[in-house]
Image: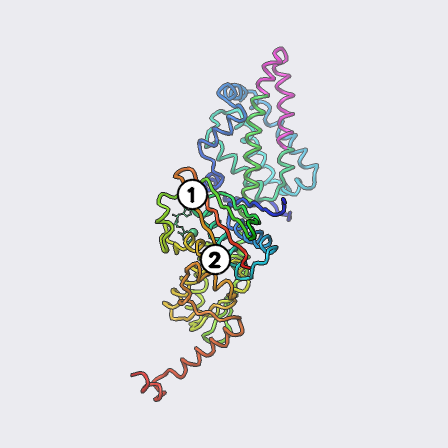
Amino acid sequence: MEKQSLPKSLNIDTLNLMNGMSLDENEIQHRKDWLQFDQSDEARLTELNEMAQGYADEVIESLYEHFLKFEDTQRFFEDPNILKRVKNLQKQYFLRLTKGNYDSKYIEERLKIGAVHASIGLDVKWYLGAYNFYMRAVATRLFKAFESKPEKALAAFFSLTKLVYMDIGLAIDTYIYQRESTIQRQQEAIRELSTPVLQLRKELLILPIIGAIDAQRARQLTEQLLHAIRDKRAKVVVVDITGVPTVDSRVANHLVQTVDASRLMGATLIITGLSAEVAQTLVTIGVDLTKIHTVGDLQGGIEEADRILGYQLIDSPADPSHLSSQE
Amino acid sequence: MVDDQVSIPILTDSDIVSARQQARELAKRFSFSSSELAGIAAAISELARNIVSYATQGTVNVSLIEEANKKGILVIVEDQGPGISDIPLAMQDGYSTSNSLGLGLPGVKRLMDSFEIQSEIGKGTTVIVKKWVLR
Ligand SMILES: Nc1ncnc2c1ncn2[C@@H]1O[C@H](COP(=O)(O)OP(=O)(O)OP(=O)(O)O)[C@@H](O)[C@H]1O
Ligand SMILES: [Mg+2]
């Protein structure tokens, strides 16, 4: 994990998070049911709020004292202003635990906290440790306050445990979700990078495709290719599919569509690298390959492209022999 | 015997690739020609693709079979998806509810030696195909 200090403000799109993680009313209720968190828990926690206000500052001070003992957590609080701000946020967070209304608004706030910690690169272990610290700090105080009624202290502590576990669950899910989103974004970036449209010479582009083509990638490839055709004013494109492991009717369909679209942009598409067996199979399935101009290998494809481009040079009004034959 | 059969759960596009590969590996043990192997792989690809497109999840079962002097491969592709309401229509070239080519099912039938399809609305679809080694 790279070193980062806490940014001034972090824009976290919580609504997007809620949707992405499918945290609707149903799912929230489901999580509560699983933890057996109900109205009585909510009531018990709300009752603690006044008391919590009394010890919040103390608990938070000791938590940060603890944080500052460790290098990994220390580095986040080098700036005293940040430390002050974070302590204040922490206090709000801490008091929120005993304020009731554990609804979707509450969940949203929790996700935001999880997301902020994930994006500053704080490992889950520190996060969990802090929760544990809270639980111990609160337990000690609860049992002291309800010295004569330990069963009341225990019940309140259990309610708090349920809520904290829900928060922990949400925080961890946010971490996972963010990491997965990052991986997905990186994969998309790699895909885009791994399919360069190369300009071989004036008016001739080459698009070597490596890896499986699914619907999303096919769309992306077609789009990329059409842009390149426009930007480079290409007349011929050689698409090499030697590196595509499965060419089925779906892929063939994409190729046919790309051929059509390129034609509309004024470019001819040549497909190379389609093995004879696969071509035969596609024809048996019923794919109309007549629309697709296929040439065995990339070398042959480039030669064919040159032939087509050469044709166009001759194919000008300056060539009388051609004009006469056009009738 | 256990090795003569593979069962591949199908959920995503990459499962389709792995079903094709595993079926190909299995089929290689019998002397299928390379174009027959390509045909088997294509058939599995079409059927598995239909699972991903229409039924979300299912299974591809591939086994080597021997029957009265002939050897071949048996592919059973099943799902618990929505089912197909009009099978003869679905079997027509060019019929597609997803704006695709509509060639998957009729194409598989042309590629394989035998083709059976069962489907019940709300219950799912099973396609059973066989390809024999030419001798
Ligand atoms: N496993 C399935 N479950 C439900 N419906 C299916 C299933 N397989 C096929 N169908 C239906 O049958 C139609 C025809 O299938 P077929 O595979 O022949 O064509 P397609 O999938 O539409 O197009 P293509 O396979 O050429 O991309 C589909 O459009 C779909 O409505
Ligand atoms: Mg299909």
Residue A134 belongs to magenta span: yes
Q: Which residue matches tag 2? A: A248
Residue A33, percent from left and from top:
50, 25
Q: Which residue matches tag 1? A: B118
Task: Name the chain under label 1.
Answer: B
Residue A325, percent from left and from top:
33, 85
Three-letter code, disc 2: Asp
Residue labelled 2 has its Cβ within 8 Å of some atom of ligand 1:
no
Relative horizontal placement of residue A126, taking residue A292 as reference (left or right): right
Farthest-out residue, top: A148
Question: Cα distance, mark 1 to mark 2?
Answer: 23 Å
Residue drawn at x 59%, y 46% as measured from the top left: B5
Q: Is residue A223 visible?
A: no
- Residue closest to the eye, A253 or B130: B130
Asked if marks 1 and 2 fall on the same chain, the answer is: no
Residue drawn at x 58%, y 46% as measured from the top left: B6
